[in-house]
Amino acid sequence: MARYPGIALPLARLRGHGYPFGRETEIVIEGFPRTGTSFAVSAFEMAQPTKPVIAHHVHAPAQLVAAVRAGIPALVLVREPEEAVLSLVIRAPQTGVAAALQGYVRFHEPLLPHLDGMVVATFSQVVRDFGEIMERVNRRYGTRFQPFDHSEENVRRVLAAIDAYTRPAVAGEEELERIVARPSHAREVMKARLRGQYRLPRLDARRRRAERLYERFAARSAG
């Protein structure tokens, strides 16, 4: 269902889930959860002289499919499945590693036929030089978005904005460090405890499938 714009996007609006694609959308920035979407959206908005209309955080392939069909800029963010899955399970423990891995596959597979209509960026590219990614978007679509100046000060501003957005929704610092969409030492400790679950032999086939998908997407991320 998440792959079909006619179903997934109205459902997202009904549930108040993310910012679905619509008639006024200027760009879609989307990815599987924990792939750098919050950083990318905040950095994109910060760089523009006026607030752009961005579709984001629905975490459904339908967002990107809708953009490609409409000829709207579509930026898909990808991250190594182990890191994305473990980060998601820490944020939403009820999900479980096996289900999160399956979700990773279900997000990426429907996008394969549409990759030619998208710009792909890896998590490491997003956090290293998001301005360069925006330049790729401009070249691909003939747009004139102002690229993000990936300076230390601007990165601090983006991370502060993410903290400020997240903090009111959590009970305290411990929960903030578990779910906030920025680097967290506490979360890295939690990931280390979960890696054994991710690497269980019974998940070998699903894990290989996810890793092959990541490789196909990442191969498209070169400038």
Image (cartoon, rainbow, N blue to C red):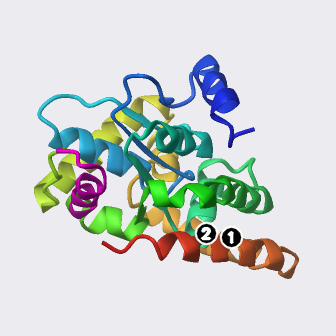
Q: Do tag 1 and tag 2 residues touch (Cβ < 8 Å)?
A: yes
What crowding class fits label 2: few (fewer than 14 Cα within 10 Å), some (14-19), or many (20 or more)? many
The magenta stretch spans residue 141: yes
Q: Judge left or right: residue 211 versus residue 71.
A: right
Which circle marks residue 210 in the picture? 1
Quadrant position of residue 149: bottom left
Magenta-highlighted residues: 132-144
| SS at badge 1 | helix
Name the residue rendered at 46%, 25% in the picture: 22
Residue 2, image x and y in percent? 69, 40
- Where is 110 relative to 196, above or below? above
- Closer-to-camera residue (142/121): 142
Residue 88 occupies which quadrant of the picture? bottom right
Type of residue at label 2?
A: Pro
Local crowd at mark 1 within 10 Å, few (<14), some, or many (≥20)? many
Report if residue 96 lies within the magenta region: no
